[in-house]
Each structure stands twice: as structure tokens, then as C-alpha cells.
Image: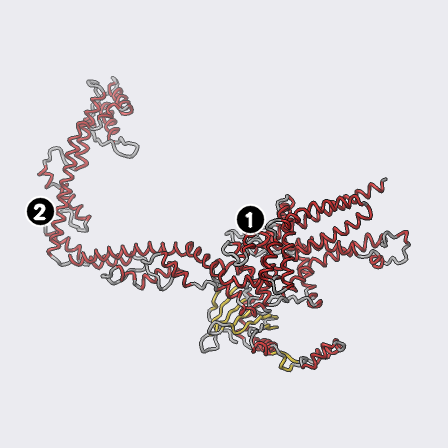
Amino acid sequence: MLAKGAGQVKILVLLGLFVVYVCLELSLNLLLIDMYAKPLEAVFGEYQLTAERLELFGRTLSGFGLALGIISFMPGHLFNVLGGAKDTTDAQVEQGINKLGKWVFRPIAFVLLWALIIPSLRIVIDGVVDSTSNEKKLSAVRAIVYKEAYLAESVTIEGFPEFDEIVSDPQRKDLVVALIPSLAYFSGGFNHLIESNLQNMADVFLQNRQEETFSKEALPRIRKFDGIYKAEWASYKKARQDYTEASRRENNFALLEQERTELLNKANERINQHWQVYSNELLKAEDFRKDYAENENIVKVYRDIRNKYQSSKCDRECRDFYRAEFAKYLNNLTFKDGERFGVYLQADEVNLTKILKSKYQLMGMFTRGRRAYLHRAYGISEEMEYEQYNQSPVATNLAIAVFKENAVHVAKEWTMNDMRPLRQAITNKYQGRAQALWVKYQNGSSFGGVPEKNLDRVDFARLYEIKVLAKIALGPYYMESFTPSIAESRYKKMWLASQDNISFIQMVTSTAATAAFSPGGSMFQLGKDAVKLAVIPPVSIAASLLAIFLLFIKLGMYLWARSKVYLVVAMGLGVFAFGIPVGKSVMGENSYHGMMVAFAEEFSDVDTFDKTFTVGFGYVLDLENGIFKTYRDLAVVDAVASVVHKKLPRDENGLPVAHIETTSFSLRSYDDLAYSVLDFTPEMLGIGEVTAPFNTNITLLKQDMNVGAYLGIRLADKKVAEVSMPNFMQGTDIGLIAEQRLFYQPDWQSLALEYVSNVDDPSYWLQLAQGDIAKETLMQRLERNMASYLNDTPATLALLNNLNEKGQSNLILLELERSKKYRCFVLGTVTAQMISESIESNTIAYEELPDCKARL
């Protein structure tokens, strides 16, 4: 009974562990789809570390399942041999394996196999990727471009409405968008469809991007320039008017006399106005501030001081003091807004007796104080009549102030009857004034003004200085056809018409660019990235499903032998957990396989294999979609996401910084170490070859901007160790000749080894008969000679080493006319991330090297 209970506990534990494993596999698969459904800018930017960790953890988990499945299916006696237990009796052996093999050697074999599978999956993918044909890489790049366009909701696929219908569904969009690169990579029909749509897509997509960029970047620049221009024109127009007026008046007696008359009229008007305001205020003094005679604060202060004044103890000196105190109080009284009360009292004018009420006493003091205040403020005494005022210094000072306001300066002793000094002052005002005004305008101008003084609006807009100002303000959005008065909408159309709408996309998706995807080509890394984006999702999904399938079969065999009840329960749970969601997805009205069947009938009717694959891919999408829709919102998925997610490190300015790997042992460090040790295996097994990145990639452009050559350079000890040159003439007769073995290059040692190794191989004798042995192609000879040439050219070799030390991997040499010299441009590695960046801006960031001394 105890043994039976222990067996059931063991079964339940195994079932629980299997469920946990399946949940983790599904979580990583769902997170992988979510990740690859994001734009490239996010995958290679904010989520770069998360994507790397997700890929590593996925390989680790799938490797665990695959290793466990493989080990569990291996015959047990193999581990007895490993354990050296050949003489073990049947009573000591359980199911053909002894205890030492079961508990020591089989676990060790499992761990070793697991550790081997983790880097092997990466190596196999890289080997397949590097050996992928350039046409396949081109297909993957096209698919990436299309995926970015779909994420931007800028295009549809013409002739495939079923695809657009599924993409328009937010619940199913992520899965199909994430697998667009995979579908285009594996399906020739879908790739041809994308190729036929690419030209229109590039035009529409990039033009939308350019319109958005123009609105965000160019319009603010244009409006800023417009403000500067209008201010400059207004300043010039006023300076021109002032200069003309000043020039007319200089040495023109009639105009000078006219201005003297105008100044005297202004002065008389100011003098009369001053007297008029004084007179009106004096008439209103009788009732000045009478409402405040009952103000609580004023009355309280008045009564307090009056009580002290009336005290029997207050003598004459005391009473003089309180009169002065109340006079000071009223004179300094102000309102909250800073306005003065407006009276001025002497101490002897203060009445602190009790003969009348406080109100009337205060009203009387307000009237007397107001009159005194007006006399002081306007400088007019109480006895002065208008005629006396008109000849007084007050009137004269008012006239002098008017003159000064008009830039006419006379002495303080000037009198109204003396006209000679006034005429002289007006003459002095205009002597050199015109030129001074123009200098003032030029000093105030943002570009130093112009010497011409008779320009109209059209001539001013055509000035060279205005063009320079426009170039600075508009920057990259300036065109020679720009004028200050041009309408924004018209200039936008002109700018868009001048753009090369498919500059970068055409470069990376044209069939003429296929050679650049070869080792040594400038787009080799781009091709690798594109193929990885196409291969990793289906390979990861396939590895996960294979691991789950193997373990499920093994678990079923285990339960069949021990408890068929648990087997039925496990099968029922499997059908419920996977069969029902997948069945619903397959049987749905808008199923993926239905979409792919319609597509295959329309576009894959020639190639039977492609048609079969396309339909099968649709069923795989249905399978993944059933799981994706059912389990994407589970808590375990969020938990795994929180573990895998890692933010991109940023500096204090919020800019991303390079991730610094820790020197301590970690899963990543083991993976990198194992990868470097085992990277020879794909070539040995004939499934591809892992190509290490080159130190520098050189693209040689002719004068007509056509590609002259691609060179991949590997450096060692400051010397060129290897040169790889893709056949940039492929597809032509010359390109075909360049691939033929025409030149003898015997290496007797390697020939001997090759003979010994292949003496029984018929294909070797066939190559020998055809003359392919001990010969090299034109491309191989060019590569060998180029390595020697670069090492013998100090200037070019120094440039290559300098770029390598700075981490700059792409060098573009533009041939100059009728010379062996080049203009040198440096740009970053052309990767899939650059597609997203260049689609956004339609430009590629590059740097021109000054004083380039490269020679080829």
C-alpha cells in the first residue's frame, strides 16, 4: 500500500512538473511573438536587452526539454556501459539500467546534452543564416520593410485582401505581423507578392513619413524665419524712411524753419495744457476728498492727536509738535495701489480745535492742503496770472522738455524769445543724422543690415544676406527656389517633389544590391539580421513544440505502464488545454489556413511545394493563434515577462549607454564561450558556415555612383590578414567568368593532403579531370592581391587601423573625377535597425573624413 501511494505521488509530481514546463514554454513563446510584433526601433532600442534575454532563456528552456526527451528515449543499457556495469544481474537492474547508470551517468549525460544544445541552437541558426543565399537575404529584408510599413498602418498588400482583413483585427494582428518575415522567407509566392508591391509601398510610406517630418521639423523653421524676415523688413523700411527724412532736412532752411514752427506749437500746446490741468484741479479743490472726511481711520488718527493736543498738560511746544505730526500724516497718506492722497499741509494750517465737528475740520484741511499741493506740483504760485506763467521758468522748462523729446537740445538758460539758439539746435540735429540713423539700423540688424538705401520689398527679399539667413534658419529643408513670401503649402509640395522617395529602401531591396549581402559586402550584417528575424520565431516555436511533444509522448508511455487512469486524465487535460483552442482557431470563419489556401491558389499555383508549404504555414498559424489568444493574458505570462524584461541602461541625460557585461560567470558568458568553441561545427556537418564580422567593410563607388567593388577586411597585428570581395558583377557574363577557376595557384602541401583525403571520392577525380584542382578564380586572385596591396599602402592601412580602433566598420570611397583619389565617408554598420531609422528620416547618418588619403 505504501509503495502504491508513493507511486501515485511520483506520478502527480511528474504531471505537475510537466505542467510547469509547458507553462514556461508557452509563456516564452507568447512573449517572443509580442516582441517580434514590435517595430524594429523598439526591438533594437528600448527592448534590446529584453529581446536578447528572451532568446537566451528560450534556447535554455527548449534545450532542457529536448535534452530530457532525447535522454529519456535512449536505451538504458547504454548508461550501464558508461558506468562499466556489464556483469550486473537482472535482479539488480531496473528496466535494463543499473543504479549507477540511473542516478549518476544518465543525469550527467542529460546535463551535458542540455549544455550542448543551448549554444548549438544558436550556432545552427547562425550557420544557416550565413549560408543563406543573397536572394533569400533580399527576401527577408523586403519583408522587414513591409512589416515596418504595416506597423505604421501605411500600406496594404494589393491583391491579398484576406491578409489585410486579419491584420485589421487587433487580437490577431500581432501574430501575423510578427511572422511576416518568416512567411516571406519561406514562401516564394509571398515574397514575389511583396516584391511586386514594394515600389508603391516605398513611395507611399516614405512620402507619409516625409510629410510628417516636414510638418514637425520644417514648418517651425519656416515660421521662425518668417518672423525674423518680417522684423528685418520692418526695421529696414523704417530706417529707409528716417534716412530719407533726415537727408531732406539737412541744410534745407525751409524744412528747418518748418520744424522750428512745429516745435514751438508743440511747446505752446504743452504749456497751455499744463495751465489748463492746473486750473481745473484748483477749481475742484473745494470738494477734494470730502468723502474721506468721515473715513474711520483718518477720523480716528485725527481725534487721537486732537485729544493729546487738547490735554491740559500739552504746552505750546507740545501743540506745535502734534500739528506737525498730523500734517506729516496727511502729507504721507497713500492708497493701497500706491496713489498719494494728494494734499500738502504746513503745521500752522492744521486745525485741532473742537469748535467744529471733525468732518468739517478735515474738509477744510483737505481744501487748504490740496491747493498747496497743486501749487507745489505744477510750480505755479497762488498769485501768478496766466501772462506771468507764460513768461515764467515753468513754461520755459516745459518747452525745453518738448524740444528734448524731439532730439533738439538747447541750453537751460534759453528763453522763449530767443530763436537763434533754437534754429542752431535744429540744424545740429540733422548734421550727420541720416548716416547715424543708418549705422544704428545696421547695428540692430541680425545680419548687419545692407548698405543700399532704396530697395523695395522684392529687391530686399532677393538680397544675398536674406538667402544666407534662410539657409541657416531652414537648414536641411532649404531649397534654392525658396522665397520669403512663398506659401507654406506650395513650398511643401516643392520640397516633397525634390526628395528621393525610395533612397534607402531601394538601395537595400534592389536586386542590384544582392552582392552587398555576401561576406565582405557592406550589407552583410543587414542580411544576417533580416534572416534571423525571419528564422528565429518559427525555429523557436518548432523547438518548443518538439520538446513538449517528446516529453508528452514519454510521459504517456510512463503512465501507460503504471496508471492508465492518470493517462486518460492527462490526455483529457491536453485536449482541453490545447485541442479545443486550436480546434476553434482552425474551424473559425477567418482562419489562417483559409487565408493561406486562398493565397496559395492565387499566387502559388506553379510550385507545388510552395503551395503545400504555404497552406501548412496557415495551419501552424492557426495552432499558434489558438494558444496565443487563449493564454496570452495569464498571470504566469506576466510573471515570466517581469523576469525576462530588463531596461536599457541610460546615462544622466536619458541617452542609452552600452551594456557592460559582468565578468563573473553567468548563462550569457557560458553561451558566448561555448559558441566560440563550437562555431566550427556547422561547416563540419555541411549545414553552413559561421562567418565572423569583418573589421572594416569598404564600398567603392564610381563617379556615376555605381558600385565598383565591395571589400571585407580582417586585420591582425595592424596588418590586413584577409580580404573578401563579393562578386559585384554576378548575373553578367563577366561575373560568370570571374567565378571560373582560370589561374594556377598550386599549394603542394595542401594538394597532397587533399589527394590522400579524397583518393576514393569520384567527385575529386571529376574535378581533377575538369582542371579545377590547383586553380583559383579571378575573385580569389583579386582578394589575395588586394591584401598584399593594402599592406603595401601605408596611408590606406593607417586609415583602416584608425577606423578599427574607433569602432567604425563601414568605409565608403567615392572616386573623384580623373584621379586616383577618393572622398571618404564613414557610417555605422548597416543593420536591420538602420532600416527603421532611415525610413523615419529618409537619410543615413554619415561622417566625411577630412584629408582622406585612401588609395586603391
**In terms of image quadrants, where is residue 217?**
bottom left
SS assignment at label 2:
loop
Q: Work out whether residue 591 can be spotted.
A: yes
| Most foreground residue, 439 or 18 | 18
In depth, the one of 194 and 557 nearer the eye is 194
Sequence order check: which comes first, mark 1 or mark 2?
A: 1
Query: Does 294 appear above or below 120?
Result: above
Q: Are marks 1 and 2 in contact (CB under 8 Å)?
A: no
Q: Position of residue 810 (x, y in %)?
A: 54, 67
Residue hosting label 2:
417
Q: Which mark is residue 170?
A: 1
Res. 529 in view: no
Residue 68's x, y, as percent? 75, 54
Examine the rendered structure and indicate whether residue 328 appears above or below residue 154.
Answer: above
Q: Residues within 10 Å of mark 2 (few under 14, many from 20)?
A: few
Q: Where is 751 relative to 251, above or below?
A: below
Q: Amino acid at mark 2?
A: Asn
Q: Answer left or right for 620 relative to 226.
A: right
Where residue 561 sits in the image (x, y, percent)?
82, 48
Q: Within the image, what quadrant is residue 83 found in?
A: bottom right
Q: How many marks?
A: 2
Is residue 551 toward the left or the right of residue 317 in the image? right
Q: Residue at x 23, y 23 (%)?
A: 319
